[in-house]
Amino acid sequence: MMACQLQTVASTSLFLIGSFAIDDTQRGTLIGLCMLPCIFMALPGGMLGQHFGAKRLVLAGLLLRTAGGALMGVGSSFSRL
């Protein structure tokens, strides 16, 4: 599931270029920014999963991703909502 989520921005980047008129540098920055939280949250996420339980943590993550997806859906430009 996680690999599919991380590839979403990369696989749809050609549509982003057409829709938001971004260049390759901005596309690369967007892909990198989507990967950045993984670097900082892997260890704390594992510790939280042990403490609160995997189901609760996955549900919280799903709710956050849904909110982020909804914000992306109403976005009108690359730089602001």
Image (cartoon, rainbow, N blue to C red):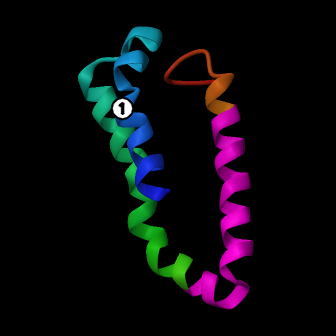
Residue at 62% x, 89% y is 50
Residue at 39% x, 55% y is 36
- Identify residue for label 1: 11
**Image location of residue 33, percent across then percent down:** 40, 46
- State whether residue 49 is above or below residue 58: below
Is residue 60 highlighted in magenta? yes
How many other residues sit within 10 Å of disc 1, few (<14), some (14-19) or many (≥20)? Answer: few
Q: Secondary structure at mark 1?
A: helix
Q: Which residues are magenta?
A: 47-70
- State whether residue 62 is above or below residue 22: below
Three-letter amino acid code at the position of disc 1: Ser
Residue at 40% x, 54% y is 3
In the image: residue 32, left or right of residue 58 = left
Residue 56 sits in quarter: bottom right
Identify the residue at the far bottom of this view.
51
Quadrant including the C terminus: top right
**Image location of residue 37, percent across then percent down:** 46, 59
How many marks do you count on the picture? Answer: 1
